[in-house]
Image (cartoon, grey):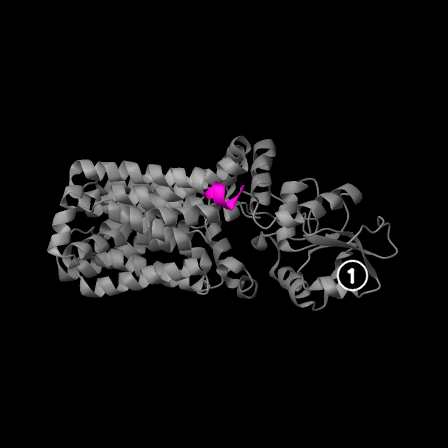
Amino acid sequence: MFVIAVWLFARHMQLGAITADWGWLFRAGQAIWANGLPHRDLFSWTFPDRHWVLYQWLFEAIAAPVYSVFGITGSVFAVGLLGLATYALIPACALRRHGVHPFWPMLIGALVLLPVSTNLGLRPMLASNLALLAQYLVIQRLRAGDAHRLATAAWIAAIYALWSNMHLGFTLGLLSITLFAAGDLWTRARDPIAATASPPSYALLFIVAVLASGLNPYGWTLYGYIVNLSLETRMNAHIHELMPPRLDNAYMQAGAALVLAFAALVLVFRRVLSAAEVIHVAVFTALACTAMRFVVWAGLFYALIAPRLFAHAGARLSPKRLRAALAPLDTPLARRATVAGLPLLGAVVITLGAPATAGPAHLAGCAPLQASLRYLDRHYPANTHWFSSEIAGSCARFYTPGRRVFIDTRFDMYPEAFVLHWFRAYQYREHWRALFRHWGIRVVLLPRGAPLVDTLRHDKRWQVVHADPGALIFAARGGTAPARSAD
């Protein structure tokens, strides 16, 4: 089960770890190294003077040179190995203090990687993943009495000072602190001698986290920026990762099964986990049900918390004969062998097994558009007003970095009204002529399945000037368009 789960996860990483977003993330990182933090949009011709809040600048500055060294294959392997470490190896090491055999966190972590793979990739959310993991481990030490309040506060300050420069997910960290505080208040009311942290400790951690999160180029104005983004509900409703997960996806079905198993075991073995732990799984699972973006972080807390519950249930529900037969595998040597052997096996699957079956890694969503983007770059001036999908805009940043785009996947970069007008024109062909007239569109690049393709084919004012298996390029008639190629 462990090998199959890791193999399926790694196959998904081969195909989706480097998403279309990487085009502008990579170029932004290069721009930071070359000219410092940009204050205006570098990539679109539609809003070149719009102020750019590059809140994840540090991640881009770190990831761009790493990608330059390792390339797409090495970067995919790095994301896969980091996922294995984050969801399986580190939880196995962290749960040793509770006497949990590493088999449980390794297996459960591998299974959690299945739903997580639907949204995990070389993106700034990795920073939030690692920061949430670090904060969880630090606070758990405080709750167990193994760390002083001030030392924990110092760690929290360091985490948030980095986090707020890498991803807006630092607000999830504040939510996690709040959930710890609420859970421990409930536990203290029921059991005053339980291992918990005091309310003043959590108040200190929260204040320190908020103060440290202001140590970024934009200060605490990022909180206002987050609020404004959340209020753009009409635009957010069309962003894929802000939509609920689809349960017709087999990987998400595996995640749902894990959640149901956890809920059933919590009801049967109510005293195994603390209230703070149960609340973490419940709240982040509820968030994941509302938006795919949260699946990665819900899976993280599940991998950290659920193995102790499954291990307890296994010990209680297994027949005595089976427990006796497995006893030789519960020695210190066997536990160390599990911690060393399973990650090594997983690493082999990620770097050798998955590529052998899934093929070479590639930029997800961009391969069908590559030929058309390069054609566009060869035949049309850089200042051409061209229209495309948001994915094509991001892919253009990777393949044709000198060409500005109409739109890309940085939806928070563009005004909400503009994004909605583009979306309705692209997806539903509503008012597309008005949009084209307003922006002086002379060239259109569309994937073959785009709704506008048939519309432009039957419009006498447009002609196909390039066609390949993945996409087509239309040009307005009467302009200086190259000769039409074979379809």
The residue lying toward the viewer, choosing from 283 and 456, is: 456
Quarter of image, res 84: top left
Helix, strand or loop for disc 1: helix
Q: Image quadrant for the C terminus? A: bottom right
Tell me residue 232's x, y (percent). 54, 62
Tell me residue 429's x, y (percent). 70, 67
Report whether residue 456 is seen. Answer: yes
Q: Is residue 290 above or below residue 91?
A: below
Report whether residue 121 is seen. Answer: no
Magenta: main secondary structure equals helix
Tell me residue 148's x, y (percent). 21, 40
Q: Is residue 120 left or right of residue 432?
A: left
Q: Residue at x 30, y 51 (%)?
A: 108
Q: Which residue is mark 1?
A: 437
Stretch of the chain drawn in magenta: 354-360
How many labels, in total?
A: 1
Q: Residue at x 16, y 57 (%)?
A: 318
Tell me residue 265's x, y (percent). 23, 62
Let me know if residue 49 is in the magenta part: no
Q: Is residue 58 left or right of residue 86?
A: right
Identify the amino acid type marked 1. Arg
Q: Residue at x 12, y 53 (%)?
A: 321
Tag 1: Cα neighbours inside 10 Å, few (<14), some, or many (≥20)?
Answer: few
